[in-house]
Image (spheres, rainbow, N blue to C red):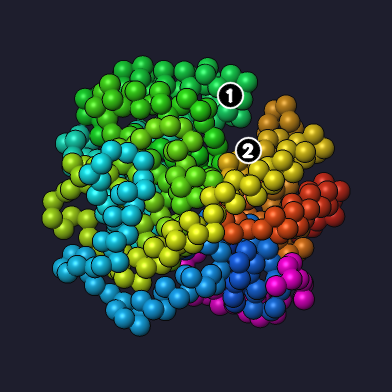
């Protein structure tokens, strides 16, 4: 498949028709529609839209389509399973594929033996499962989360999210006994610490805040069930904490009998070049939450924990279609593909190729304030001024629009909506990565020169 290939200026006439129908029939709550892409089919890391335009995909459905599109092993697994049996509800009967998958996840995830798995359908409900497990097993109620965290849209996960307050507008009250603390973002943090130069200082400031302010005065410290964190904050803007941060956080957890829950919905399943993002930090979490890429985006999530935490009251964590035989087979196929095709290594290699290319843009363009990433989870932070680090959302939207016109699906993200987000399928080839990087540089040049008149929407 030659990519990119722009047959007609996107969005073309067929796409425009769907945009209208979408606006008429799909709830605005179901999406901000950052990009006017109407996919018809996909292959590898490319998407062909309804008008025949072929795009390179740096989004992979928000990091979910880890094995790309139409992967033959995945296609066969799903086809075979649907032709045998498509549903067997965990709440009533047994399910071979779910059991097989649970065993595999228990064995491959970091942490002590005797782990058990509960399944959901999305990252959001899995975060709710984790919250229930933590409260039930500890008989404690409070949770500490991080500013900039995105955990989902169910009431539990939305309450735990600290990202874009507008998403909570007129929907309260939310789940109580949750308190948010600053995330150790090396680039912008409330203490003004340069976390790249002084990572230990940043860790110390954050841990001090958690222990001496929050646990010291704000919450009853013997009533905290869990601290919930993303190992790399995804929607917050690919924020990578100092390497010692999670070890220090775990010490606090152990000191006060608090569970450490790690949200791997975005970072898990190879995204950062390891199976799980937390592996970069050498810590074994008490609870681990997976979603998105687990079944290559087909509606499966999982919470992994020691059996003493994972076992709750019979039936308190059931969802009718969760881990049905089709999505469980898709997950098993996803893990097989990642292993067989060495996609963890690909994520590292293609990711570092991209990171190197983007690092060069830091010196070349005044608007590129920061470049950060691990594996195929990368962000470019677009600013008005390198010194003040003032985010530039408008410029970000223009760069994304220009990239779209040139055939690259490049979304924006971030606490301030000013980051170019690079989360392609893990099957991305070096060739397509280079072409994508060329397009991003050209889009930056065009946006700076004032050539770009439109902009994509950004989170606000
Ligand atoms: C870290 C994290 N947790 C949870 C979620 C929610 O997942 P879902 O949209 O599948 O409900 C997301 C989605 O972006 C996420 O990035």
Q: Is residue 184 above or below residue 274?
A: above
What stretch of residues is rendered in magenta?
1-28
Provide residue 428's location: percent of width, then percent of height. 63, 58
In three-dimensional space, the C-alpha distance between marks 2 and 1, rounded to whole angstroms, equals 13 Å
> What residue would you read off at disc 1?
195
User: Are there few (<14), some (14-19), or many (20+) residues within 10 Å of tag 1?
Assistant: many
Instruction: Report the residue at 73% width, 58% height from top.
Output: 431
For the question of whether residue 82 can be seen, the reply is: yes
Residue 189 locus on image (x, y percent): 55, 27
User: Considering the numbered disc 1 on the image, is that residue within a helix, a strand or a loop?
Assistant: loop
Q: Measuring from the top left, give residue 356's x and y in whole percent.
A: 72, 40
Q: Is residue 364 left or right of residue 177?
A: right
Left or right placement of residue 69 versus residue 125 in this view = right
Q: Is residue 14 above or below residue 337?
A: below
Judging depth in this view, the residue of 113 and 365 nearest the camera is 113
Q: Is residue 142 above or below residue 71?
A: above
Q: Which mark is residue 372?
A: 2
Q: Quadrant of residue 430?
A: bottom right
| Residue 275, numbered label | none
Asked if the magenta segment contains residue 24, the reply would be yes
Q: Position of residue 211 (x, y in %)?
A: 35, 20
In the image, is residue 367 part of the stretch drawn in magenta? no
Within-10-Å neighbours for mark 2: few <14, some 14–19, many 20+: some
């Amino acid at each position: 498949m030659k990519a990119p290939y722009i047959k007609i200026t996107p969005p073309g006439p067929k796409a425009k028709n769907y945009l209208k129908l979408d606006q008429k029939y799909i709830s605005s709550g179901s999406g901000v529609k950052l990009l006017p892409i109407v996919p018809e089919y996909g292959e590898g890391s490319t998407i062909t839209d309804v008008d025949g335009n072929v795009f390179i995909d740096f989004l992979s459905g928000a990091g979910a389509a880890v094995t790309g599109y139409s992967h033959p092993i995945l296609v066969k697994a799903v086809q075979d399973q649907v032709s045998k049996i498509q549903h067997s509800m965990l709440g009533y009967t047994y399910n071979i594929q779910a059991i097989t998958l649970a065993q595999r996840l228990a064995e491959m995830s970091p942490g002590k033996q005797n782990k058990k798995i509960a399944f959901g359908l999305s990252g959001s409900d899995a975060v709710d499962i984790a919250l229930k497990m933590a409260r039930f097993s500890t008989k404690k109620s409070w949770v500490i989360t991080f500013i900039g965290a995105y955990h989902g849209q169910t009431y539990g996960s939305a309450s735990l999210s600290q990202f874009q307050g507008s998403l909570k507008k007129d929907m309260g009250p939310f789940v109580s006994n949750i308190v948010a603390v600053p995330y150790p973002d090396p680039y912008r943090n409330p203490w003004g610490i340069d976390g790249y130069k002084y990572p230990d200082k940043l860790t110390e400031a954050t841990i001090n805040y958690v222990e001496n302010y929050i646990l010291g005065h704000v919450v009853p410290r013997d009533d905290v069930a869990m601290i919930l964190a993303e190992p790399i904050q995804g929607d917050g803007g690919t924020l990578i904490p100092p390497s010692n941060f999670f070890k220090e956080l775990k010490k606090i957890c152990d000191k006060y009998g608090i569970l450490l829950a790690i949200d791997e919905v975005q970072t898990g399943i190879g995204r950062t070049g390891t199976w799980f993002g937390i592996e970069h930090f050498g810590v074994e979490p008490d609870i681990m939450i997976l979603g998105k890429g687990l079944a290559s985006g087909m509606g499966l999530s999982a919470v992994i924990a020691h059996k003493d935490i994972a076992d709750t009251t019979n039936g308190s964590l059931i969802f009718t279609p969760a881990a049905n035989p089709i999505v469980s087979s898709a997950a098993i196929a996803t893990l097989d593909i990642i292993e067989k095709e060495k996609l963890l290594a690909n994520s590292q290699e293609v990711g570092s190729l991209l990171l190197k290319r983007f690092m060069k843009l830091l010196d070349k363009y005044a608007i590129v304030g920061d470049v950060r990433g691990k594996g195929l989870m990368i962000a470019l932070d677009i600013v008005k001024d390198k010194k003040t680090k003032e985010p530039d959302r408008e410029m970000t939207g223009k760069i994304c629009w220009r990239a779209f016109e040139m055939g690259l699906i490049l979304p924006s993200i971030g606490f301030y909506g000013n980051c170019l987000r690079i989360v392609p399928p893990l099957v991305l080839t070096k060739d397509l990565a280079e072409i994508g990087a060329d397009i991003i540089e050209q889009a930056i040049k065009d946006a700076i020169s004032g050539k770009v008149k439109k902009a994509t929407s950004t989170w606000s």
